[in-house]
């Protein structure tokens, strides 16, 4: 048990550091208490997923089944809504609304990185969902995940995917602008106006999470770099435009999505 926990400590820190920093910032800046409670509940669920999920799927068939489930989640908003000004990025679960990309893409990057024969088509199918929604942040996350896998494997197909992803991001950005949601979207920019030191601390927590994913996580390089690349893409769009700030902002989807992905990516202790 001790070896298992120690093996997963980098993943726990990669998830917990930015989420706890974001919860503290929300409390200091007077966010509704429900925001902090929802993120706290999501963190508890994310840690459970991280610790309980099997780190390496038992066979390629189970990995591909999970890939299809995650791809289907990306298409649920386009089919079932909800709709906001013609934009469909969310999955409604009763009173809770989850951003589909933040929920599904982190784990999708991990399973695709471990299936090189199908990684490129999987990413292209996910990018199509981003265009249909439209969702520039998810497209950018997939773009940098593809860059990460290409860096690790030198697979030219992932290089093509990264180029396609960049243009998909531009196309989605033109059609997908929405007003910013306080405490959820563009958090670093919003918080910097109120407290620059606080915003700098949140930025440092994201850098720490990215570094743990890219360099320390006990996983093979394609999975590590794909996961870190997705966080980079989501985070950049969360600064450039009105998109959710992953892990540090209000919202359960990113916490659950990265909890699952970190659990999947971490190799079993030997």
Image (cartoon, rainbow, N blue to C red):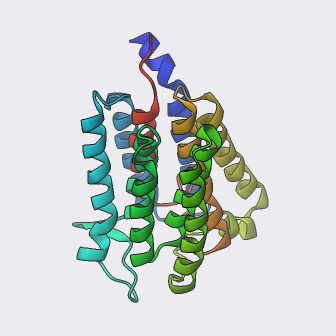
x, y (%) of residue 145?
55, 51
Q: Position of residue 77 (x, y in %)?
A: 31, 72
Residue 256 place in picture, x, y as percent:
39, 48
Q: Residue at x 39, y 63 (%)?
A: 125
Going by the image, does 217 lie left or right of 61? right
Q: Is residue 121 left or right of residue 184?
A: left
233 with respect to 86 (left or right): right
Task: Judge left or right: residue 182 versus residue 54.
Answer: right
Quarter of the rendering containing residue 137? bottom right
Residue in the foreground of this view, choosing between 211 and 143: 143
- Residue at image position (30%, 34%) is 60
Identify the residue at the far bottom of this view.
85
Q: Does any portion of residue 261 appear in the rendered image?
A: yes
| Quadrant occupied by the C terminus | top left
Vertical side of 152 occupied by 70: above or below: below
**Where in the figure is residue 212, as x and y percent of width and height?**
62, 35
Q: Nearer the viewer, residue 117 or 217?
A: 117
The relative height of residue 88 versus residue 122 in the rendered view (above or below) is: below
> Residue 79 is drawn in which quadrant?
bottom left
* Image position of 38 with respect to 220: above or below: below
Can residue 22 be seen here? The reply is no
* On-image quarter of the N terminus: top left
From this view, report whether residue 125 is shown above or below residue 257.
Answer: below
Badge count: 0
Residue at 36 percent across and 77 percent down: it is 88
Question: What residue sits 41% from the left and 70% below the top?
Answer: 128
């Amino acid at each position: 048990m001790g070896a298992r926990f120690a093996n997963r400590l980098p993943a726990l820190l990669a998830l917990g550091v930015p989420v706890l920093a974001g919860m503290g910032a929300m409390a200091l800046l007077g966010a509704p208490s429900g925001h902090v409670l929802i993120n706290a509940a999501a963190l508890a669920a994310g840690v459970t997923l991280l610790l309980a999920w099997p780190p390496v799927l038992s066979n390629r068939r189970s990995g591909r089944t999970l890939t299809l489930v995650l791809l289907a989640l990306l298409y649920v908003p386009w089919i079932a809504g909800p709709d906001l000004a013609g934009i469909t990025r969310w999955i409604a679960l009763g009173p809770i609304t989850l951003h589909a990309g933040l929920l599904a893409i982190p784990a999708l990057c991990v399973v695709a990185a471990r299936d090189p024969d199908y990684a490129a088509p999987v990413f292209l199918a996910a990018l199509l969902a981003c265009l249909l929604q439209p969702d520039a942040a998810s497209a950018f996350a997939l773009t940098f995940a593809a860059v990460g896998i290409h860096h690790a494997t030198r697979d030219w197909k992932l290089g093509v995917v990264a180029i396609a992803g960049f243009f998909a991001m531009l196309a989605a950005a033109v059609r997908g602008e929405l007003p910013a949601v306080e405490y959820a979207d563009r958090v670093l920019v919003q918080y910097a106006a109120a407290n620059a030191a606080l915003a700098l601390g949140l930025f440092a927590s994201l850098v720490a999470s990215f570094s743990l994913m890219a360099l320390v996580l006990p996983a093979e390089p394609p999975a590590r770099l794909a996961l870190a690349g997705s966080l980079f893409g989501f985070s950049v769009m969360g600064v450039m435009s009105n998109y959710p700030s992953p892990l540090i902002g209000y919202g359960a989807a990113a916490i659950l999505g990265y909890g699952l992905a970190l659990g999947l990516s971490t190799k079993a202790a030997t």
